[in-house]
Amino acid sequence: LGGGLAIALERMNRIASARADTLERLRGGATNPLFDIYPALGDRIPWRPLGTYPTPLVEFALPFSTPGTRLFIKRDDLASRLYGGNKVRKLEYLLAEAALLRRDSLITLGALGSNHALATALHGAALGFEVDLALYDQPVTPFVQRNFSGFLAAGARLHYGRTIPGALLLARRIHRRRIAEGRAPYFVMVGGTTRLGCFGHLSAALELGRQVADGIMPEPDVVYAPLGTSGTAAGLVVGLKLAGLRSRVAAVRVADAIAANSLVLRYLAQDLADFLHAADPSVPRLTITSQDFDVLPNYIGDGYGLPTAAGKDAIDTAAAAVELDTTYTGKSFAACLDYCRNAPPDRVVLFWNTFNSAPVPRSRGRADAPAEFRHLVGLAER
Ligand SMILES: Cc1ncc(COP(=O)(O)O)c(C=O)c1O
């Protein structure tokens, strides 16, 4: 088991390298806050933009009175008109690596209504990749049905793995099959969380640092974000430190504790920080400690994907400003509102909206779904 884990980590940590001019061509003249501050990283790390940045910061009018507490929302839901949310920033690095390696297809896994799977299907197809999705069960909600319909509309090939281990094995089989067919598949880890995937929110936190420096919002005391596969929170933890912000990340656990916990978060963040310093010694050496983040375990309710009453209330509270979902952002916003209600005076709070708000394309209906899924997802007929 230890050996298997070491191999898995080694794979998750590998980042393809290329000549600086090749990487520059891949970027097509674009840049991002990370590469602006540390150009040597731009010469080392594959990246190509899929979104529009910076994403807006808006102040949210709290529906209760607080002694000076202000809440802002980072509108990463607006990151892309094709499909926004937190997966866009990760895919900018991962799909760039796939292109660099001359891969022609993508394989990833996710739950039946995975935002990550949908983002990969839509952005992957837009870049000309064929996309295979190995899916596992989750409670079927309207959000799940909407995304599942989006998979079909995006033209992704769907495979049913039932459980997470089942989907992982299936992904490996599909990978072998595609190679036997003469294709060149690229495997995208669940949630897009690898060392390279974590760069997305590292750069996002530097973007926030610029917005704070420009006076768009005051320095946040705390940044709320969901904790799923932990890549988003890990990137933010490292990026906020690099940006010189004292903001603490409040990572709201929305997935099972075996995958979403402070050990995983700390590992990913420290690994990223160590890599950065080794790749470019002008990046300060950082030590990630428990002072840098909190993992909040009390908002998941009965489990991943199962709506909670507090989450639904939070979705209603947010509705005039942003649409949140029952699996990730509703639960996280519930935690954020609780904090604002009881915060010490004059706190500045930032809610990082990781959900997509672009319209999700819909398939024609049930008939498009492969047979093994039809009984699971009662797709709305049009
Ligand atoms: C809307 C949304 N928010 C948050 C997350 C969690 O991000 P991460 O997996 O990087 O922890 C996900 C996906 O996993 C998501 O789809």
Image: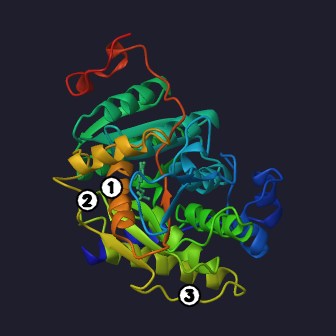
Instruction: Kindly indicate the quadrant of the structure image that contains residue 36.
Output: bottom right
Q: Secondary structure at mark 3?
A: loop
For label 2, the residue is 299
Q: Quadrant of the N terminus?
A: bottom left
Where residue 305 appears, as percent x and y from the top left, is 26, 46
Name the amino acid, label 1. Ala
Instruction: Judge the density around disc 1: few (<14), some (14-19), many (≥20) Cα neighbours within 10 Å.
Output: many
| Pointer 1 with pointer 3, Cβ within 8 A | no
Q: Secondary structure at mark 1?
A: helix
103 displayed left or right of 362: right
Where residue 56 appears, as percent x and y from the top left, is 64, 51
| Pointer 2 with pointer 1, Cβ within 8 A | yes
* Residue at horizontal 53 percent and vertical 38 percent from the top: 182
For label 3, the residue is 286
Q: Nearer the viewer, mark 2 or mark 1?
A: 1
364 vs 133, nearest the viewer:
364
Instruction: Judge the density around disc 3: few (<14), some (14-19), many (≥20) Cα neighbours within 10 Å.
Output: some
Where residue 214 appears, as percent x and y from the top left, is 75, 66
221 displayed left or right of 214: left
Instruction: Kindly indicate the quadrant of the structure image that contains residue 50.
Output: top right
Q: Which mark is residue 334?
A: 1
Q: How is the image coloured?
A: rainbow
**Could you tell me how far apart the alpha carbons at marks 3 and 2 are, in whole angstroms?**
30 Å
User: Is tag 2's residue or tag 1's residue first in the polypeptide sequence?
Assistant: 2
